Image (cartoon, grey):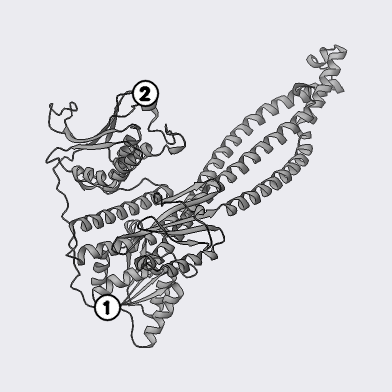
Amino acid sequence: MSFEDFPIRRKLMTIMLGTSGVVLLLVCSVFLGYEFFTFRTSSVQQLSTLGEVIASNSTAALAFDNRDDASEVLAALAAERHIVAACLYDNQGRVFARYPSGSGDAVFPALPGADGYRFEKNHLAGFAPVVQVKGRRLGTLYLRSDMAALFDRLRLYAVISVLVIGGSSMVAYVLSRKLQKQISGPILALAETAKAVSERRDYSVRARTFGRDETGALTAAFNEMLAQIQEQNLALQRAYDELRQTQQAILQQERLRALGQIASGVAHDINNAISPASLYAEALLEREPNLSARARSYLTTIQRAIDDVAQTVSRLREFYRQRKPQITLTPVDLNQLVGQMADLTRAHWADMAQQSGISVEMRMELLPALPVVLGVESEIRDALANIIFNAADAMPDGGTITIRTRVAGPGGADGRSGAPAHATVEISDTGIGMDEETKRRCFEPFFTTKGEGGTGLGLAMVYGAMRRHDAAIEIDSAPGRGTTFRLCFPLPAEPVELAPPAASGPAAAKRLRVLVVDDDRVLLDSIAETLEYDGHQIVTANGGQRGIDEFLAGQRAGRPFAVVITDLGMPEVDGLRVAAAVKSVSPGTPVFLLTGWGQGMAEEGRAPENVDRMLTKPPKLRELREALASV
C-alpha cells in the first residue's frame, strides 16, 4: 500500500514522527560534528602548550649537552597518558633524548620536520622549536599523542544521541497518537456525513433547509463551522507569523549570548597571553639602546602583531554586543603598511613556496609621497594579508606578486581628470585568475575555491573592512591572466599628517607602593618587573581573595598601598569585589581596573562603582605610567 492510500490517522502519525526524528538526527549530527572539530582544535592547542613547556624546560639540557637531564624532562610526560612518544633532536637533527626511554629509532622520525602540529592517521604529532631566551635555536621537540580521548568522547556522545532520539521518538509517538484525533476526528466525521449524503443522492438536504430537523441543523452547523474555520485560520496564521518572528529573535539572542560567553572567555585568555609579550617588547625597545637594527625591527613587528590581535578581539566583542562597530580612524601611511605586510607574510608567499619547489617573487612599485589616509591600521593590515595569501595560493606553479600604490582622481583610475580623490593599493598576481562566477561570489561568506583548505571568510572580512572605511574594492581578473585587487581609500578633505610617535621612557613620577591583583602569574610577573624598573614597590597577588588579604595586611602593618591595580575577570572573587573591599577599608585609595573591556566601558561612560580608572588589556607601559603619575 502506498503512502497516498494510508488512513489519515496513520499519515498524520507518520509525518509527525518522521519530521521529529529527522530534526533530532540532524541536531545530534551537528553536535557530534561540532564536538569533533572543536576537540581536535583544543587537542592541538593543548599539545602545543605542552610542547612549549617541555621545550622551555629542555633548553638547559640541550645547551649543556646533558642527556640525563633531557631524559628526566621527557619522563615528566608520563603524567600525560595520551602522550605515546616524544623525543628531543639537537641542532644537528640527531635524536638527543627519547620517551619512553626504551623506544627504538623506528618510533621517531629520522629528522625533525617543520614546526607545528598535524593529525596523522590515529595520532596527533608535531614539532616545536627549543629556543634560548636570546632566540638561538638549540634543537627540536617531537611529540605524538593518541586520539583515544576523542574516540571515547564521540562514543559517549553517540550513545547519548541514540538514547535521546529513542526517548524522544517514544514521547512523540504517544503525543501524536493522542493529538492526531484532534484533526482526524472532525475530518472523518465530515467524510461520513458527506458519504451518507452522496449515497442518498439527496442534495436538497444540503441546499435546502426543511425546518429544524436534524438535516437542517447539520447543514447550518457545517456552514457555520466552515466560516469559523476560515476566520480561525486567519487568526492562527497571524499568531504563527508573530510566534515565528519571536522565536527567530529569541534564537538569535541565544546564539549571540553563547557567542558572547565564548568571546568573553577567548578575549580574557588571549589578552592574558599576549599582555606579558606586549609589556616585555615595549620595555626592551625602550630600555635596550644597544639592540641591533634587526632585533629592534623584530620587536617592533611583534608589538604590532600584538596590537592587531587585541584589535581583532575588540572587533569580536563589538559583534557580540549587537551594535555597529565604533572604529576610530587615524592617519595611516599605506606605503609603510605595504612594506610591513610584505615582511609579515613572507613566510607564506616565499618560504612555503620554496619548500614546495616553486618560486614566488614580490615586487613593490610604491608612489613616493603618497598622501596619508584615515583608517584603522590593524584592519587594513588584515585586508592586505588576506589578499596576499590568496595571491600566493592562486599561483601553484609560482609567479610574481606586484603591489602598487598610486593616487586616482574622481574621473578615473589614471588620476588625470580633476584633483586626486583616492589613494589606491593594487595587488596583482600572475596566477590562474577567476571566472565571472567566482568574481561575482568571491566576497560571499563561506564561498571558497580552495576546497577543504579554505574557510571562505578571508575576502568577506576584506569586504567588511573596506565598507567600514567607506572605501571601494575592485577586481580585474580572467582565467589564465591573473588577478588584480584594487583597494581605493578616500583621501581626507584636508591633508593630514602621521601622528608623532608616543614619547617613551619612564615618567618623572613619585615612587609608589602598588598592589597588582590578577589570576595570571605570568602577567603579574611582567607587570611587576616593568614597574619595579621605574622604581615602584610592587606587591603581587595571584587571585582576588589573595589581593584583598594583601591589602588588609598592608593596612594592619602600617604599610598601606598607594594604589591597587586589579584584573576584572577572576574566578571566585572578581575585580569588582576587590575594588569594593578596598574602598570599604580605605575610600581614598585609587583602584585601577585592568580588563580587555576597559576601552569600550570607558567610552560609554560605564566605569563600575569603586573604580577610579579603567586600563585596557593588553596593558601599555605608557598607560600604566600615566595612571600611576595621576596618583
Q: How many other residues sit within 10 Å of disc 1, few (<14), some (14-19) or many (≥20)? A: some
Q: Position of residue 570 (x, y in %)?
A: 45, 66
Mark 2 is on which residue type? Asp
Q: Which mark is residue 512?
A: 1
Q: Which mark is residue 435?
A: 2
Q: Residue at x 24, y 77 (%)?
A: 535
The image shows residue 343, relative to residue 579, as above or below, that is above
Residue 117 visible in the picture: yes
The image shows residue 187, relative to residue 489, as above or below, that is above
Residue 423 visible in the picture: no
Q: Is residue 405 left or right of residue 108?
A: left
Mark 1 is on which residue type? Leu
The image shows residue 602, relative to residue 406, as above or below, that is below
Q: Which mark is residue 125?
A: none
Q: Is residue 261 left or right of residue 330?
A: right
- Camera-nearest residue between 630 and 506: 506
User: How far is disc 2 from disc 1 in space, using C-alphas?
Assistant: 65 Å
- Camera-nearest residue between 523 and 347: 347
Q: Residue furthest bottom?
A: 557
Dividing the picture into quadrants, the one containing residue 375 is: top left
Q: Residue at x 85, y 11 (%)?
A: 201
Q: Residue at x 86, y 18 (%)?
A: 196
